[in-house]
Image (spheres, rainbow, N blue to C red):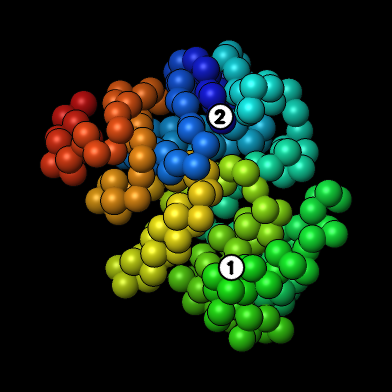
């Protein structure tokens, strides 16, 4: 479904990704793990066109998308749930969700999609008229996930959903991700909690120093072995 082929990218003259290649299969959760500074978020930003490619190619459903604008990708079925949630705090919860259905091709189905999101996150329905700034960190993460679902995406890129959350809230977030997986969603998950990532993933990539140093099916990777690689290089 998604192919990242020998990609190099970074910030200005500073290169971060060095010939990174990953493949994402339809209906699977692909986890990208690794230490801070490994290039995980940079990879997601490059897929979304937020950073220009210096070399390589990103292909979605057989079509190169590297030259496309970031704002055109939701029309094609690709959305990103960014690190840190990035909700609109002064807007209502419902208004935040409706922003996820902004692409023209998605607007006609927005009301029906909103009810689907409310079925997944009933708390958001209860508080739909309140400002998003009133939500706790975990609730805000649910809102960010719901906003991403509003365009009925074929592919979701989710960046560090557990960041800054209490363990009990992290468990709730991953329960939601598990339900999305069972529903057949295709997800690329960047996550520092390797234990949680391995539980939900089908395919695992370990990134270190801007390179992929491990690519393996999740059932073939133990947490201990992954941590040994994680800290040994």
Residue 39, quarter of picture: top left
Measured along the vertical axis of the image, is residue 35 above or below residue 170?
above
Residue 175 left/right relative to 146? left
Residue under the image location 65 percent in, 48 percent down: 153
Q: Label 1, on which residue?
A: 143
Q: Position of residue 52 (x, y in %)?
A: 65, 25
Query: For the C terminus, which image quadrant?
Result: top left
Q: Nearer the viewer, residue 211 or 103?
A: 103
Q: Position of residue 221 (x, y in %)?
A: 21, 36
Q: Is mark 1 in CB contact (under 8 Å) with mark 2?
A: no
Q: Which mark is residue 211?
A: none
Measured along the vertical axis of the image, is residue 199 above or below residue 45?
below
Query: For the N terminus, which image quadrant?
Result: top right
The answer, for residue 164, to whether it is visible in the render is no
Residue under the image location 34 percent in, 35 percent down: 204
Q: How many marks on residues?
A: 2
- Single out the mark in the foreground, 1 or 2: 2
Residue under the image location 19 percent in, 31 percent down: 229
Q: Secondary structure at mark 2?
A: strand
Measured along the vertical axis of the image, is residue 114 above or below residue 179?
below
Q: Label 2, on which residue?
A: 2
Q: Residues within 10 Å of mark 1 (few under 14, many from 20)?
A: many
Q: Earlier in the sequence, mark 1 or mark 2?
A: 2
């Amino acid at each position: 479904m998604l192919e990242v082929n020998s990609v190099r990218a970074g910030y200005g003259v500073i290169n971060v990704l060095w010939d990174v290649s990953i493949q994402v299969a339809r209906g699977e959760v692909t986890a990208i793990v690794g230490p801070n500074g490994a290039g995980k978020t940079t990879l997601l930003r490059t897929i979304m066109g937020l950073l220009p490619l210096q070399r390589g190619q990103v292909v979605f459903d057989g079509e190169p998308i590297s030259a496309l604008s970031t704002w055109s990708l939701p029309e094609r079925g690709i959305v990103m749930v960014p690190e840190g949630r990035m909700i609109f705090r002064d807007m209502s919860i419902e208004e935040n969700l409706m922003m996820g259905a902004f692409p023209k091709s998605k607007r006609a189905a927005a009301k029906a999609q909103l009810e689907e999101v409310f079925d997944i996150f009933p708390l958001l329905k209860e508080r739909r008229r309140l400002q998003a700034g009133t939500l706790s960190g975990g609730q805000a993460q649910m809102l960010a996930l719901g906003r991403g679902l509003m365009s009925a995406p074929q592919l979701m890129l989710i960046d560090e959903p557990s960041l800054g959350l209490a363990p009990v809230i992290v468990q709730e977030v991953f329960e939601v991700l598990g339900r999305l997986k069972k529903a057949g969603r295709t997800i690329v998950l960047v996550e520092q909690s390797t234990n949680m990532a391995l539980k939900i993933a089908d395919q695992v990539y370990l990134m270190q120093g801007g390179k992929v140093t491990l690519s393996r099916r999740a059932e073939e990777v133990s947490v201990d072995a992954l941590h040994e690689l994680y800290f040994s290089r």
